[in-house]
Image (cartoon, rainbow, N blue to C red):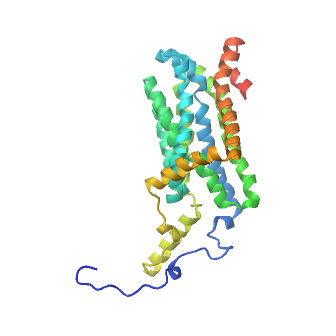
């Protein structure tokens, strides 16, 4: 062992020192939390998702103004919308395994903080390149709610009630992008505000999340047991007390295999998965295609005011 020490005596059975939930009715288990607590947490998480989805389409009304201000083609300005959605595809690859390792709350807080910072960065940018880069990172680093919030709902609700609760997540994802365009158009059209206030507004409504999320209870079951084991260890001084999650770790290789190569393999080898993914990709693509098509059709074709064309979309 070193230092002149002999090998220690054999340790007792590790199962005797492993912390678990105290039966199916354990109040620490998220399924047994009071309904009011669950409703409050679901409201906060759904609002966090709404902010991310709302931010995806908030620049749709600013595209013509950015083209004129930065002297770029209309297609270049629409990259502010496209790169944000591209960030949605890349960010969850990292956020999902991190939430399994460190819990839902730390990941959601980090994502919300970075999302807020990069939205303010978009609003303060003085070059189109800066706008596009910050929009990508706002979507990529802020995309954690897209994968972590459904997992949190699954942590708190069983199979019988989970479907009802996930409806609120689905509403947040769909209502956000469709609600943003007409607000975006009115803000960009307002001479006392301008297109920068679109990103300012997204950043401002995201700030309250930074003061609420850190004080929410963790919902990931293994992390709850880790906290329970840490508390028992502190009270008893028995260093061998631990949770099963303490022995769990992910390497870079495992993250790549589990979150990149395996999903691609399943996508092209499972017909049902491929069909559903293709359908969802088509619907999601059409949704954001409409965001850029409506101004062309109703503003240029029907000569409608920039703000009112958003109501046509809504």
Instruction: Tell me where residue 8 sits by quadrant.
Output: bottom left
Left or right, residue 49 beside residue 66: right
> Which quadrant is home to the C terminus?
top right
185 horizontally vs 9: left or right? right
Q: For the view shown, which residue lies furthest in the left direction? A: 4
Task: Tell me what residue is drawn at x 49 percent, y 16 percent.
Answer: 72
- Residue visible at 56% across and 29% down? 82
Left or right relative to 122: residue 293 = right
**Residue 125 visible somewhere in the drawing:** no
Tell me if I can see residue 55 in this picture: yes
Quadrant where the image shows the N terminus:
bottom left
Give coordinates of residue 91: x percent, y percent.
52, 43
Frontmost residue, 40 versus 222: 222
Could you tell me which residue is drawn at 49 percent across and 45 percent down? 113
Figure check: 98 above or below 70: below
Q: Residue at x 50, y 48 (%)?
A: 94
Q: Residue 53 location in percent, x, y?
A: 62, 38
Image coordinates for residue 25, horizontal then vertical, percent: 68, 73
- Residue farthest along the front direction in this orientation: 269
Question: Which is more toward the observer, 36 or 282?
Answer: 282
x then y, percent, for residue 120: 48, 34
- How many numbered markers are drawn? 0
Looking at the rendering, which quadrant does residue 282 occupy?
top right
């Amino acid at each position: 062992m070193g230092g002149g020490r002999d090998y220690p005596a054999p340790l007792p059975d590790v199962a005797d020192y492993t912390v678990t939930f105290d039966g199916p009715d354990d109040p620490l288990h998220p399924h047994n939390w009071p309904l009011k607590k669950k409703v409050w947490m679901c409201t906060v998480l759904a609002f966090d998702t709404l902010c991310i989805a709302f931010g995806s389409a908030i620049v749709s009304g600013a595209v013509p103004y950015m083209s004129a201000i930065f002297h770029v083609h209309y297609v270049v300005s629409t990259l502010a919308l496209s790169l944000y959605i591209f960030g949605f595809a890349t960010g969850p690859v990292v956020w999902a395994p991190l939430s399994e390792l460190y819990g839902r709350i730390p990941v959601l807080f980090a994502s919300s903080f970075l999302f807020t910072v990069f939205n303010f960065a978009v609003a303060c940018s003085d070059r189109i390149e800066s706008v596009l880069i910050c929009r990508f990172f706002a979507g990529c680093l802020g995309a954690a709610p897209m994968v972590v919030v459904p997992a949190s709902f699954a942590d708190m609700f069983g199979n019988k009630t989970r479907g009802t609760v996930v409806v609120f997540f689905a509403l947040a994802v769909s209502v956000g992008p469709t609600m943003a365009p007409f607000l975006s158009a009115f803000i960009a059209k307002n001479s006392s505000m301008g297109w920068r206030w679109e990103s300012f507004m997204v950043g401002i409504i995201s700030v309250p999340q930074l003061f609420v999320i850190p004080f929410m209870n963790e919902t990931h079951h293994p992390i709850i047991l880790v906290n329970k084991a840490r508390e028992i260890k502190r009270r008893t001084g028995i260093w061998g007390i631990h949770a099963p999650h303490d022995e769990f770790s992910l390497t870079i290789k495992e993250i790549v295999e589990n979150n990149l190569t395996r999903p691609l393999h399943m996508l092209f080898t499972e017909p049902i998965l491929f069909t559903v993914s293709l359908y969802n990709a088509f619907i999601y693509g059409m949704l954001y295609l409409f965001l850029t098509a409506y101004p062309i059709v109703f503003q240029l074709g029907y000569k409608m005011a920039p703000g009112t064309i958003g109501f046509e979309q809504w």
